[in-house]
Image: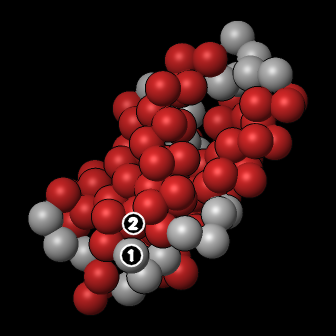
Amino acid sequence: MTVPSATMIQLVRELTASGPEDRGLAADGVTDLVGALDAGQAHAVAQLLVWLAVDEEDAAALESQLNALAELASHDLLPAAVAAEVRAVPHSRLHGSSLEHYEYLLSVADLPDSEAP
């Protein structure tokens, strides 16, 4: 499947919103789209989520971003090289489920792309 370009553009706007609650809600929304994203769209969304997670200071938004990445990984839509970039998230920001998602993503990063879950 493929998500319409207008929906993708709106998703990018929401993921990059100035408010952390809006960013968190948008990341949560990614999980609803996972089944409809094609591989290219998923890669673009994943890359954006990683970049956002690295600089995210809000704990709830970070948890949502990492959860969305984990969901992409569980559907074979997260290249290991993109997952590896999660290592740049400051460890001091990881707690509870954020830390669990982070550790799962690192396990994906350690697999060749052809073996990623």
Residue 57 image position (x, y, % from top left): 42, 82
In the foreground, 89 or 30: 30
* Residue in view at x 65 percent, y 36 percent: 42
In the foreground, 114 or 8: 8
Alpha carbon distance from label 2 to label 1 = 6 Å
Residue 31 image position (x, y, % from top left): 45, 33
In the image, residue 75 above or below residue 35: below
In the image, residue 62 above or below residue 46: below
Q: For residue 10, what is the image quadrant?
A: top right
Look at the numbered disc 2 and give the secondary structure of its residue. helix
Residue 88 image position (x, y, % from top left): 48, 80
Looking at the rendered structure, which numbered label has been put on residue 62?
Answer: 2
Look at the numbered disc 1 and give the secondary structure of its residue. loop
Mark 1, residues whose alpha carbon is within 10 Å: few (<14), some, or many (≥20)? some
Looking at the picture, which amino acid does disc 2 mark?
Leu
* Residue in view at x 76 percent, y 30 percent: 7
**Is 65 left or right of 99, judged from the image as shown?**
right
**Is 38 left or right of 71, judged from the image as shown?**
right
In the image, residue 27 above or below residue 88: above
**Is 60 left or right of 25, judged from the image as shown?**
left
Q: Is residue 21 visible?
A: yes
Is label 2 in contact with label 1 (beta carbons under 8 Å)?
Answer: yes
**Quarter placement of the N terminus:** top right
Mark 2, residues whose alpha carbon is within 10 Å: few (<14), some, or many (≥20)? many
Look at mark 1 in the image and give the residue it sits on. 58
Looking at the rendered structure, which numbered label has been put on residue 35?
Answer: none
Residue 47 image position (x, y, % from top left): 65, 56
Q: For residue 99, what is the image quadrant?
A: bottom left
The mark total stands at 2
Looking at the picture, which amino acid does disc 1 mark?
Asp
Q: Is residue 73 visible?
A: no
